Amino acid sequence: IMQLYVPLNWFGTYYRAIQKNFVDMENMFDLLRETHEVVDAPGAGPLIVNRGQVEFSNVTFGYTPERIILKNVSFIVPAGKTVALVGPSGAGKSTIMRLLFRFYDVDEGAIIIDGQHIKTVKQDSLRKAIGVVPQDTVLFNNSIKYNIQYGNIDAPEADIIAAAKYADIHERILTFPDGYETQVGERGLRLSGGEKQRVAIARTMLKAPKIVLLDEATSALDTQTERNIQSALNRVCANRTTIIIAHRLSTIIHADEILVMKEGEIVERGRHEDLISHGGMYHDMWEAQLRNDQELAEEVKPETDIN
Ligand code: ADP
Ligand code: MG
């Protein structure tokens, strides 16, 4: 039995490692391909960000010509305000983020930042103006310090620590074996989902962009500490133009506008209270989430009694 068990377990472990590498490789090829697809217009100048207003004007887009993904999407995020995107998986929320970052060009319509079409400006200046806090942050196999500094390579040590404090991860880092020099990532100390998101928040603080894109983690964060990430997220978004993809609707009840997306279209829009009283899709999503939260709260865990 042992003879059989060991190789199977070995296989399982390596299979998962290989699978993960494939995912990473896929992402890398995606990025390589994407950077080739989009080129700077001849004579393109830098994006000049003043206040940081973002506008999608009648944007239509498909990854391939056969299949339209976004249909005539229009919205404005006034400087310093927050717009939330909600809707089922596949609705086109992440596509909006990718287009704003200009991984792809729109087929129709325009994306405009402070009056400038993003197609007409240098890509690096566009990407410098936008900070991203992704769902799952990829860490480099390097020190935790390097991983935070990545947002701004020239940042002095004091700024790195300030950013880490801002993201509520400084105290945690001090408990690591080598403090800020501790190696993290696949080959070093593994960080939890919440900790990785804090690294992304710290990076974004250092980058200090006018525009922040936030992709909330899909899975509910478990521990109290991880739940506390909300205040760090609120801090990084404060006074910045923010677009947030939200899965927990409770985090966006104060958003300036909520866009409810379905199959590439905005089907409802407004503030939380308006959408609730409207009694449509958002209302149903909210009710479903309340029921779900209640069920989770009522769930008993007999295994904790046994142990
Ligand atoms: P959401 O973030 O709302 O879950 P996405 O914007 O990721 O949705 O995806 C919208 C649609 O676009 C989905 O049907 C998805 O399958 C498709 N899609 C996403 N990325 C690609 C891609 N690189 N190539 C082709 N289709 C894609
Ligand atoms: Mg998505």
Image: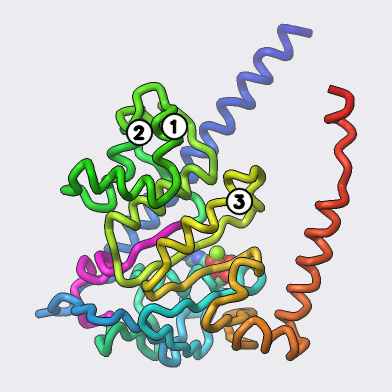
Query: Relative to 152, is 77 on the left or the right?
Result: right
Q: Residues within 10 Å of mark 1 (few under 14, many from 20)?
A: few
* Residue 242, horizontal then vertical, whole percent: 43, 73
- Helix, strand or loop for disc 1: loop
Q: Hey, what amino acid is under mark 1?
A: Glu
Residue 227, label in figure: 3
Q: In whole angstroms, how far apart are the C-alphas of marks 3 and 2?
A: 26 Å
Find disc 2 in the rendering and name its residue. 141
Give the residue displayed 33% in from the left and 52% down from the top.
203
Residue numbers of the magenta segment: 118-134
Q: Residues within 10 Å of mark 3 (few under 14, many from 20)?
A: few
Total marks shown come to 3
Specify the quadrant of the image occupied by residue 87: bottom right
Q: Hey, what amino acid is under mark 2?
A: Asn
Specify the quadrant of the image occupied by residue 25: top left
Question: Which comes sooner in the sequence, label 1 or label 2?
Answer: 2
Find disc 1 in the rendering and name its residue. 186
Q: In whole angstroms, how far apart are the C-alphas of marks 1 and 2?
A: 6 Å
* Residue 7, horizontal then vertical, whole percent: 65, 15
Residue farthest top in this picture:
2
* Residue 97, horizontal then vertical, whole percent: 44, 70
Q: Quadrant of the N terminus?
A: top right
Q: How is the image coloured?
A: rainbow
Q: Quadrant of the C terminus?
A: top right
Task: Tell us which disc is closer to us: 1 or 3.
Answer: 3
